[in-house]
Amino acid sequence: MSEPVLFDLDSACLRGNPLGDPHRRSVEVHLPPGYDGVRRYPVVYWLPGFGARPSLTHRPLAFGDSVAGRLGRAMAEGRVPPALLVVPDCTTAYGGSQYIDSAACGRYAGHLAEVVAEVDRRFASLPGPAGRAVAGKSSGGYGALVAGMTTGLFSAVLAFSPDAGFEHCYLPLLPAALDTVRAAGGVEALLARRDTGPYDVPFMVAMSLVAMGMCYADTPGTAPADALPCDPVTGLFRDEVWQRWLRHDPVRMLPAHAGRLAALGLLHLTVGERDDYGMHWGVRALHAALDAHGVAHAYREHAGGHHGIEHVFTEALAQLWRVWGEKEAGACAA
């Protein structure tokens, strides 16, 4: 793909958010091969994971191409339907928003809807849910699932290693994260490392759990230490806090939202067989729950873990041909 188009969006949803994070956000748009501003194209909204840059232009490793480069090449070769690729910025002071409306962090589901409306206003996109997909990895995959469950904005959801089955993907990380918090000198001291580093794996895991607690908190002004499912000093478990987390678990959300997911043109789940953070067991549980509720979906486990899985995105997005076909994938005149 060519260089992305960037525009700033003054978000009404994020203005005055509880964390004081910026309400003016950049949106990155990658145009499909042959885009001329006349012919209308479908749109893939890509949601980055926790702590990731809100961009697909950077190579994740020293080897290979960026995600935007991979998908642009696949579009040019006809393996993936030509589409606009849009990356919103939904980061917070804690690293991520989970793309939900949070009393403690801000209205990021609302902001995603603002981005959709603005893209339709600025670009030659196919209007309406039929021409939109939402995809992402890890927290981005979680955000894609929740958007598919709770909004009517999208006709396709592709979730890669999403947060799900919270007992599997969060609780096993908690003891080591508490060790990191203790070694740092407490939650506030850990948060101070956001400006100084080092940003090693233990720090990122501990920060991610603090961020999850803030995203799932239901009271403005919640202190980060109080948002964790156990006391970070004594280790005493707080069941009332954990139950609040579980209300946001896609496995537990499913019964109330199965109908909306069943109406999607595509629901795709992918996870590594040995995910570094236990996501494979949570996604397996979600897969089983979807089957139990009769929700049609594609499910794939690959041989990798949580990182270095960019190659699986292309083959998954190739399934969008079944949803959009030739007309929707760029053959519709404006």
Image (spheres, grey):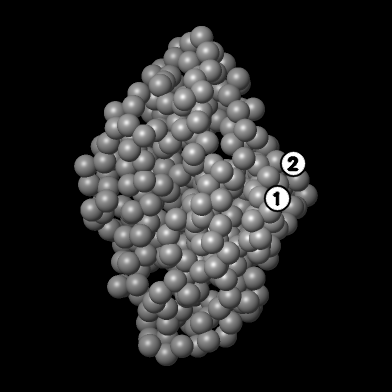
Query: Which of the two marks, 1 or 2, is nearer to us in this view?
Result: 1
Residue lying at the far bottom of the rendered structure: 333
In the displayed structure, would residue 189 be above or below residue 21?
above
Mark yes or no: residue 198 visible. Answer: no
Q: Residues within 10 Å of mark 1 (few under 14, many from 20)?
A: few
Q: Answer left or right for 66 relative to 287.
A: left
Residue found at x 53% / y 13%: 236
**Count of picture labels:** 2
In the displayed structure, would residue 104 be above or below residue 175?
below
The image position of residue 213, as x and y in percent, is 45, 31
The amino acid type, in three-letter code, at marker 2 is: Arg
Quadrant in which the C terminus appears? bottom left
Mark number displayed over residue 278: none
Q: Nearer the viewer, residue 144 or 33?
A: 144
Residue at mark 1 to residue at mark 2: CA–CA distance: 18 Å
Residue found at x 64% / y 56%: 293
Q: What residue did someone put label 1 on?
A: 288
